[in-house]
Image (cartoon, rainbow, N blue to C red):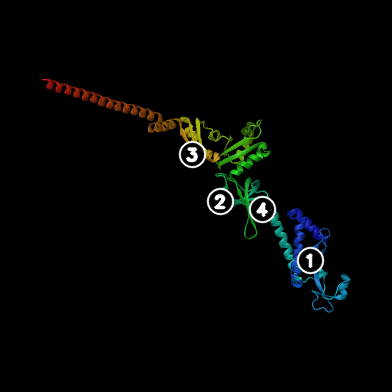
Amino acid sequence: MTEIIEALNMLEKEKNIEKAVMIDSIEKAIVSACERDFGKDAVVAHMDPETGEITVTAPKQVVDEINDPNTDILIEDARHIDPDCEINDFIQCEIKTLDFGRIAAQKARGIILQNIKEGERKAVYDYFKDREKTIMTGVVQRYVGYNLSINLGGKTDAILSSREMIPGEKYRPGDRIKVYIVGVKENQKGGFRIVTSRTHPEFVKKLFEREVSEIADGTVEIMSISREAGSRSKLAVWSNDSDVDAVGACVGLNSVRINNIVDDLCGEKIDVIEWDEDPAIFIENALRPSPVISVVVDEENRMARVVVPDEKLSLAIGKEGQNARLAARLTDYKIDIKSESQAEEDDEYYDDEYDEEEYEEEYDDEYDETEDADAAVEADEAEDAVEDDVAEDTDDVTDEEATEE
């Protein structure tokens, strides 16, 4: 039996399958092989992890005459096991493995091999499951259509989809390649598939964590990232230590650190900018290398109006809008970029359309003219009244003179 233990020890070392798991599989296989003769859930098997000795027991009924040797035991034999037993009692009796039938032995062997194979598969699955959201290095095997088959160690291969490859990169069999483990998914057939990527934004983040010790120990944090794989990425970083420059730590002395990452990304450009809790400053930083004149932020609607120098408008927007697009993703703000002259034109338009001060002045002038007109009417009415009084007085004098005459 020591050969079995030696074999289990070797499997544990080479296949990374726990010895206890394999012993449990063997015990279950033996129980399964005995179900036909002794009934389900009746047999108990135990394997000594040191010696490999297997003990199998099953309950038998104490009788004075045997009808079925698999389930019955004579009382005189039973009292050698339990001196106090009586007729119709059940006692646990050891079953010799030599008593196993040929079919039962074959069944046990098949189940043992199956369980060991399943244990090996589960060990590999658990290994890669623990490495989800990390970077692994593999060896290119071959192209499968437009996809790439990569060996990640042992007999485990993963497929890198053409959609997850950086545009323009080419590999040959035997090349070493770094991939981001997006996830490990089990399938209906009992196997599993390792999902890998080189275009995922987290791939860039993990490369920085590997290369920059300040990020690995938590001194510098990556606050957000936006990426267009194969072309350009923007990374917003923040330092928890006032004595540590977050951007400088990521770039490294003579740009060594960032150049190593750029090499891993096949020359992809990377902008490392400083994160700020003030969204206006953060947006200004995100639009670099373009200078910014002003930023007006609407936090409620997550929008920002940015004004840049006339000659820097194309730089702020970037080729095919890339710089503005990446900045918007990085900051999570919708960014409207205007040149200085465009902003002035817009302001003049709104001023011409409605100028509150000018409107109030015109209203006041109109109001003053109205008051003057009203005063003139009142003056005219007063003058007419005086003229009427004078006329009446004149008429009275004329009447008196006519009477006297």
Mark closer to the chain start, 2 or 3: 2
Of the 4 image quadrants, the one containing the N terminus is bottom right
Between 178 and 241, which is closer to the camera in this rendering?
A: 241
For disc 4, the neighbor class at 10 Å (few under 14, some 14 to 19, many from 20) is few
Tag 4–tag 2 contact (CB < 8 Å): no
Give the SS element for disc 1: strand
Mark closer to the chain start, 4 or 1: 1
Q: Residue at x 80, y 57 (%)?
A: 6
Mark closer to the chain start, 4 or 2: 2
Tag 2–tag 1 contact (CB < 8 Å): no
Quadrant for residue 381, please give it. top left
Q: CA distance from mark 4 to mark 2?
A: 20 Å
Q: Which residue is mark 3?
A: 321
Seen as rendered, the residue at the extreme left is 405
Residue 344 sits above or below residue 16 on the image? above
Query: Residue 219's spot in the image, x, y percent?
Result: 67, 36
Q: CA distance from mark 2 to mark 3?
A: 30 Å
Tag 4–tag 1 contact (CB < 8 Å): no
Q: Which residue is mark 1?
A: 44
Q: CA distance from mark 4 to mark 1?
A: 37 Å
Q: CA distance from mark 3 to mark 4?
A: 42 Å
Mark closer to the chain start, 3 or 4: 4
The amino acid at mark 3 is Gly
Q: Which residue is mark 4?
A: 156
Between 85 and 34, which is closer to the camera in this rendering?
A: 85
